[in-house]
Amino acid sequence: MAKETTALKTGMTVLRGGNVPAYTLEYLTPGRRKKIGDFETILMSYAEIGRSDNCIIQYGDDYQTVSRKHAAIERRGNEYFLIHLSQMNPTLLNGVAIANEALLKNGDEIQLSMEGPRLRFNATPTGTANMGFTRKIGLVTKQAIKPYLTLVYFLLVILIIIACTGGWFIFHQSKKVVILSDELQKSEDRRLQDSMRLAIQAEQFVKQTEVTTKELEAVKNNNNQYIEVIKKLNTKVGELEARKPEIQPGGTAFYEQFRDGVYFLEVAEILVSMPNGSSQKVNMRWSGTAFLCSDGKLLTARHCIQSWRYAQDEFSQIINAAELNGGKVFVKFRATSINNWFEFDYSNVVLDDSNDKTVTQTIEPLKGRKKEKIKINYKYADDWSHDWAYFKTDRTSNIEYDKDLSTKLKAGEKVYILGFSLGKGGPSEGKINPLFSESTIGQEGISSSGLITITSRSFEQGNSGGPAFVQTGGKFKVIGIVSKGEFDATGSFATIAYVVPIANIK
């Protein structure tokens, strides 16, 4: 009796307005009073399928291979199971016969016997809370009451037997019970009618509420549009009133915060001691940019320090040959910022030339009447990922760098550059004022050449060795050192340039 009791309890829960999980079965072949494509919504936690009148899903006698109780679908928690009941004919799930039971999934196809009728199981939860009351009554009557009329009749027979054996008194009391039952039934009918009327009124109220809500939402959207237009107008008015000549929002504050730590780097003196012991000053000068960090390092590009390794002109060849063939090279650099300046020697600079290429040339200078072959070594730098150098000072600034961030940049991030483009802002103009520019990260991460790719470049020669900042967490951090730019077909600088990641520094 447990399944019958459960069915009746489920029906009462639905009629009281409780929410009961439901699923649907689609008829892929005709059933009793059902045609192909019809759907059956099932509320009961246990629903039998077969030719019996007590089955919730019923088939006619024209399906001889369908048993009286062929199969059942049972809900267990949030899962549904197909149970095989027939002792004569198989139950198939997606074309495969099941032994006892199988877990059902949305869209599964159920077939009763090899050539029998087919159903499609739809596990999409619908629930009964939002169903109309009339539909609820129909489903409960069919699925919770009608299949168990035999049980009801059985209980009535028992009551009649008890009434007959109980005598005249019980007979007359039974009449009263019947009268009371009739009155109770009439009262229940009236209650059901009132409930249906209230349900209809509730549905009408819900529909009216939905219409009112949509109207209010439309008014709200219109108000929001008006507010946005007013905001834009106020913003435009503010821009017109301010007329601030800033390069970008916050650009002036950024510039004033970090310009003191940016230095104009230039060669003050070069003295070369040749392998034969002679010495000479080299009339060769160059300049670039350097920046002082919070850890005391004055960072710059290596080609701003070892310029002769990146060129093959006459003076560069002299310095290169002297340095690698028993001579000595003395270079004094001067670094000048807005508030101070200092000098340092080439011998105290930290750099990495391990990837430079060595080239050996053999010459035969005349010495009297005999020719003596001499081998001269040169080194040339072509790995720009090592284009970094630093001098350790006893000073500090507020410029911080982030090695980890320098390897994880995203394409499209803004890069802010400070430096002396074409020497502008240097000592020759009377006051040190590095130039501000803005570019864009061109590709994610580090390129195959070990560099950060920059597009929409807005800086020139003279920026080499300068800091490249990005904004992260409300702060500006240096992620690289300005290195070099590409050339277009005409030999002019293209918009693509490269920055050495801070992570490359050893």
Image: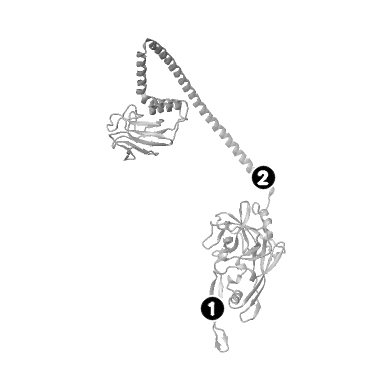
Residue 41 in the image: state x and y as whole percent: 40, 31
Question: Can residue 495 be seen in this snapshot?
Answer: no
Q: Is mark 1 on a helix, strand or loop?
A: strand
Return the residue found at the far bottom: 369
Residue 20 in the image: state x and y as whole percent: 45, 31
What kind of residue is marked 1? Gln
Residues under labels 1 and 2: Cα distance?
Answer: 70 Å
Q: Quadrant of residue 87?
A: top left
**Residue 237's disc number:** 2
Local crowd size for mark 2, using a 10 Å CA cut-off: few (<14), some (14–19), many (≥20): few
Q: In this view, does 133 lie above or below 339?
A: above
Return the residue found at the far front: 166
Depth check, front residue: 137 or 290: 137
Residue 37 in the image: state x and y as whole percent: 36, 34
Camera-side mark, 1 or 2: 1
Q: Which residue is drawn at 67% across and 69% down?
A: 344
Residue 486 in the image: state x and y as whole percent: 56, 63
Q: Which one is earlier in the sequence, the residue at label 1 or at label 2? A: 2
Q: Quadrant of residue 112?
A: top left
Q: What element carries label 2?
A: helix
Q: Is residue 354 above or below residue 226?
A: below
**Residue 86's disc number:** none
Local crowd size for mark 1, using a 10 Å CA cut-off: few (<14), some (14–19), many (≥20): few
Q: Is residue 201 above or below residue 471?
A: above
Q: In this view, does 320 lie to the left or right of 192?
A: right
Q: Mark 1 points at which residue?
A: 361
Q: Which residue is drawn at 36% across and 16% down?
A: 162
Q: Is residue 113 left or right of residue 433?
A: left
What kind of residue is marked 2? Val
Depth check, front residue: 141 or 449: 141
